[in-house]
Structure formats: C-alpha cells, structure tokens
Image: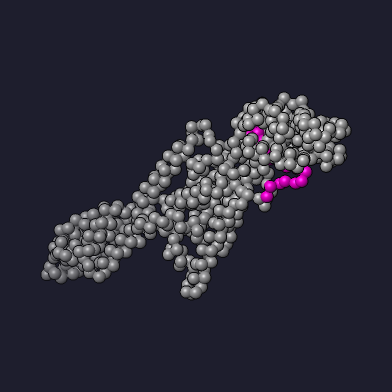
Amino acid sequence: MKANYMDKVYTALIEKQNYAPVIDNNGQRIQYEGMRIVQKILEGKFILVELLDADCLSGEQIMKKLEANRSNLAKMGSPSVFAFQVFIFNSEPDEGKMQLIKQGQMEDVYLKKYLPCISVDLENRKVNKLYDLPIQTEGLENILNLMLGLDVVNADVMNDNDIRINTERLGESEGPPNFLAKVPYVTYCLMIINIAIWLVMNIYARIKNIDVSNLFIPFGAKENFSIMSGEYWRFITPIFLHADLEHLFANSLSLFVFGRIVEGMYGHKKFTFIYLAAGVIGNVASFMFSTYSGVGASGSIFGFFGALLYLWVENPAAFRRYFGNNILIMIVINLAYGFASPGIDNFAHVGGLIGGFLTSGIVKLKGVSNKLLGRSVFIAATIIVVILGLYYGFNNSRNRDYYIERGKYKELVEMADSGKWKEAEKLGEEIINMRPERNDIKLSTLYNIAAAEASQGKYDEALETAESVKKVDAPKGYYLRGLLYLDTKQYELARQELNEAVKLNPEYKEEVDQYLKQIEEELR
C-alpha cells in the first residue's frame, strides 16, 4: 500500500508539477524501497521533495537524517533551497517521531535555506504540515491529498502559489541536477564516429605506407584554397577528423564529459544541432582568420561552453547552482592556453563558443518572455554572423592572396614557362583584377604580364604594365622599362631607365653595367 502510494505521488509530481527525478552518474534514477526523490528548478529557487517511508526509520535515524540535511543545506550555494521531507506512515504516527521531525526542521532566512516537513497518515488519510514557515506549496499538498483519494482544490495547479514563481523544466527531458541525459546516445555515437574515422584513416595510411597527415585534406580538412574553390562541405567535415591519438583522446574526453551535460540539458535533437552548428561556425571563424589547414571537434566542444553560457543568461540561478564560476574560469583558461600555444586554432575555438551560444538561443531551454532573448533574435544574430563571416572570409586579403598563390599564380608561372603567352597575359590580368595585397605576388604577376605582352609584340602595352610596376617597386619598374626599350632598340630611353634603376637601388649596378655596355656597342 505504502509503496504504491509513494509511486503514485512520485509520478504525479513529475507529470503534473514539472518535477524531475534525481539520477546518479550512471543515468539511473535514485529510487530506493523506502525513498523517492524529485526536484525542480525555479527562477532563483531550488525545490527538492523526498518521499520517505517513516515506519522503516527509527527515531535516531530520523534525527540523523534531518541533521545531515541541515548540514548539507548550510553548505550549499546562493540559490534559495526548499527541501521538503514527506514522512509517510501506515497509520497514526508515533508521537516521539513526530516531535523529532518537528524539531529537525530548518528555517534560515539569511541563507535562504528551508527544511520543511510534512507527514502523511495513510490509514486515516491525513496530510499534516508540521512547519510554521510562511510558505505553502499547494501543488505538493494537492498531490499528496489527491493520491489519498481526498477532494482537493485545483489539483492540477502548476505553480507553487505562495512561492509565486513560474517553473519550467530546464530541458526537453527530465533534467536532473547534474544535467546528465539518462542515455546520452548522441554523445556516444559522435565519439564512435570520431574514433572510427581516425582508425580508418590510420589503417589506410599504414596499408598505403604513407603519413596519415597526407590524408587530412583528401578526407575533408578545413583548407582555405579548397573552400574558395567551391568545396564548401569542408566547413563541416573537419569536425570528425583528428590529427593524432592525443588529439582524438582529448576531444573524446571533452565530448564525454561536457556532451552528456549539454545533451541532458537540451535533449538529443537540440544537442545535435548545437554540436554541428557550433563546429561549422568555428570553422567559418578559422576560415576568416587563418590560412592553415585544420581538423578536430574543438569548435564543437567550445560550442558546449557556449551552450552553458546561454544557461547563464537564460537562467542565472540554475547556472550558479550547478556550475558556479567553474565554467567561466575553464573557458578563460582554455582560450588563454590556445592563444599562447602555437599550432592550436583558437579562432575555431572562439567561433565555436559564439556558435554554441547563438544556436542555444535558437533551440532554447524553455520559453523566455524577455524579447532580447527571443528565438527570433538569436536566429537573426546567427544568420548575420554566418553571412558576415563568410563574406569577410571570401574577400579578405589574406585568403585572397593565399588562393591566388596556391592556384592562379601557380598556373600563371606554368603558362609563362611553357610559352603560352596569350593565356598567361589573360590570367595575369585576372589575378591583378583580384587585387592581391602581397607585393611579391603583384610584382611577379605584372612581370609575367609584361613578358607575355612583349612576347606577342605588344610593347606599348608592356611599357604601360612596367609603369604599373613602378607603383609597387620603383627600381624594378625602371629596370623593366629599360629592358623593354633595349628590346625595341630604343637605346637612349633604355639607358635613362636603367640608370634611374641603379640610382634607386644600387644592387642593380652589376646587371645594368652589362646592359649599358651592350648599348654602347650598339651605338658605335
């Protein structure tokens, strides 16, 4: 009879009052024969209800339990805590036990910690509040009475009326205090996928007798030239690649620790969206600011931190209750370590952190009345961040020069070496129109254009191109024009240009002297 009553109350509190069961680190509900525990987080308050089989407890056990609870409450952090103890008796409670229960209650207004007790007499169908505290939880009392078969007022009430704070569960599922999903299967699946891909790459590398690092780009690493060439899928594939065993282990451990927390908070589908979106935004950030190729799930891992930061914004009381300042300190330390250590793509970390925060605001833990935290605000912010990030990434000089050097400039040199002057001239002009910032690329490209034009007999155009060289490097421009005039047998003009080149840069003297000697011989 008693176990049945406890189960009914336990279920009703979860279904009708938005309580959630407390679970252990293995994802199992903490539920014993003589005890059931549920909890819920309010805005700034934490409510705990323990259903206890009082007949199985001696007076000394009741006294020690309440004493331990008072001690634990005194050590807890800043949120207000109401830890209701419901002692359930088969019949009229023993007066000695009742006295101990009443004496064991706690009311600390300064610490905002309360330990109110309620007794239930199943035989006589009585529910008695044993505290004189100025609080009433009609929802809890109604459920206790309802399960006894008594008439109650507003049995389906969804608020704790005298506490007067709306309560909504933190996540899609029944979120426990440690935020661990009962079965975080998405986290485990992601770990398996990462490990499997790492094994495939390493086995393949061993079979082919090649270094596994040679497989990163073919397998989908973030590589700016490839992205600018149209391989946009490289924003997502790096999330599943890892450089070495140490890299894989570190990210797998972080995924195991923080993934279970975030998956427990947001639920499986939302968690998957946050993980992938944060990884993509992290790779967009890396694409914007780094030309180095990159692999790893670090952007997604930092997305978890962003998701926890969103909890800090949406429900600061719950954040302080379960994390305190630990997460903030951890984020700062990880970012500082990333900036101080060579070889770490901290741009992806920062991007993942921002991405995790923004996408958490899209999927949300619960409804938020504050318009600044509305879903539409976060959707708009995410779209703006991604669009601006991609625009900057595809148009900044760093990526543009990298793309030119790795692709079109390399092709230009090959065309010039093979004497394809018409094609070289056209490609060179295309490169200049892309406005490269690096002077070495500009100069070399203009030189190849001038050579292509001269080789086709377009000396007037070649001289104009050489004039453009002067704007980048004046000595080289004069030197090039001197050679063009020499080639067209305009010796006096050639001599003037070459002498000017030596004046501006004496390093040309040895070569210019040879050309001047040639000019003197031609003029005799």
Is 63 rendered above or below residue 214?
above
Along the viewing direction, whichever of 46 and 112 lies nearer the viewer: 46
Magenta residue span: 28-46
| Quarter location, residue 136 | top right
Report whether 51 appears left or right of 184: right
Along the viewing direction, whichever of 395 and 451 lies nearer the viewer: 395
Q: Is residue 303 visible?
A: no
Q: Residue at x 71, y 35 (%)?
A: 147
Report whether 146 appears left or right of 352: right
| Quarter location, residue 227 | bottom left
Query: Which x, y percent locates residue 151?
Result: 70, 28
Report whether 298 appears left or right of 139: left
Helix, strand or loop: magenta stretch? strand
Query: Which x, y percent locates residue 301?
Result: 54, 51
| Quarter location, residue 251 | bottom right
Query: Which x, y percent locates residue 160?
Result: 65, 30
Query: Which x, y percent locates residue 340?
Result: 54, 53
Q: Residue at x 32, y 56 (%)?
A: 439
Is 477 rendered above or below residue 416?
above
- In reply to whether residue 318 is colored magenta, the answer given is no
Q: Is residue 276 visible?
A: yes
Q: Residue at x 43, y 54 (%)?
A: 235
